[in-house]
Amino acid sequence: MNNTFLNRLKAAMQSANLNQCELAKKSNITQSSISDWLNGKYVPKQDKIDALAQALNVTPAYLMGWEENSKELKSIEDLDFSGINRIAAHFEGDEFSEDDLTEIQNFINYVKQKNKNKEK
C-alpha cells in the first residue's frame, strides 16, 4: 500500500472539510471504495484518482506523492493549456469541453511526473 497516497488523501479530505460520505457523493465513487483506500487495502486506479483529485481540488500528482504541494486548482483557468490547442489541431470535430481539457491536463501532468520520477 502506498502510504503517501493514504496520507495525502486524508490531508486533502481534511483540507476540503469532507468526510467519506461527502467525498463519495462529490466524486461519484462508492463510500466503500473510499473506506478501503483510507484503510490501506489498496490504491485506486487512475480514473478514480482523477475523480478524487477533482473532488478535493488538488492534482492527481499531489495525491500520489509526485508533487510536494497540493497546488489547489481554483478553476479550469488555473491549468496550463499551452500546447493543447496544437494537439487539438490534429483532430477533427468538436472543440474540447472543460471536462476534456481537465482530463487532458491531468494526463499530461501524470506523464510529466512519471517521467520525472524515472530520472531520479
Image (tube, helix red, strand yellow):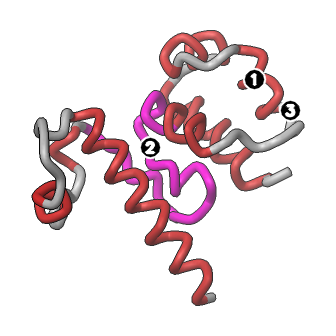
Instruction: Give the distance between the C-alpha atoms of the residues marked 2 and 1, in whole angstroms.
Output: 19 Å
Lateral position of residue 4 relative to residue 69, left or right: right
Q: Please state which amino acid type lies under the numbered disc 1.
A: Ser
Residue beneath disc 1: 33
* Residue visible at 59% across and 34% down in the picture: 48
Q: Please state which amino acid type lies under the numbered disc 2.
A: Val
Instruction: Give the distance between the C-alpha atoms of the residues marked 1 and 3, in whole angstroms.
Output: 10 Å
Residue beneath disc 3: 39
* Residue visible at 54% across and 11% down in the picture: 25
On whether residue 64 falls in the magenta region, the answer is yes
Labels 1, 3: front one = 1
Crowd around label 2: few <14 · some 14–19 · many ≥20 (10 Å): many
Q: Earlier in the sequence, mark 3 or mark 2?
A: 3
Question: Residue 100's image quarter?
Answer: top left
Residue beneath disc 2: 58
Q: Which mark is residue 95?
A: none
Crowd around label 3: few <14 · some 14–19 · many ≥20 (10 Å): few
Q: Earlier in the sequence, mark 1 or mark 3?
A: 1
User: Please, which residue is most extreme toward the bottom here?
Assistant: 119
Q: Secondary structure at mark 1?
A: helix
* Residue visible at 69% across and 49% down in the picture: 5
* Residue visible at 29% across and 33% down in the picture: 99
Q: Secondary structure at mark 2?
A: loop
Lateral position of residue 110 relative to residue 37, left or right: left
On whether residue 75 falls in the magenta region, the answer is no
**Residue in the foreground of this view, choosing between 99 and 19:** 99
Q: Secondary structure at mark 3?
A: loop
Lateral position of residue 2 relative to residue 78, left or right: right
Lateral position of residue 90 relative to residue 115, left or right: left
| Region rendered in magenta | 53-74
Q: Position of residue 26 (x, y in %)?
A: 48, 16
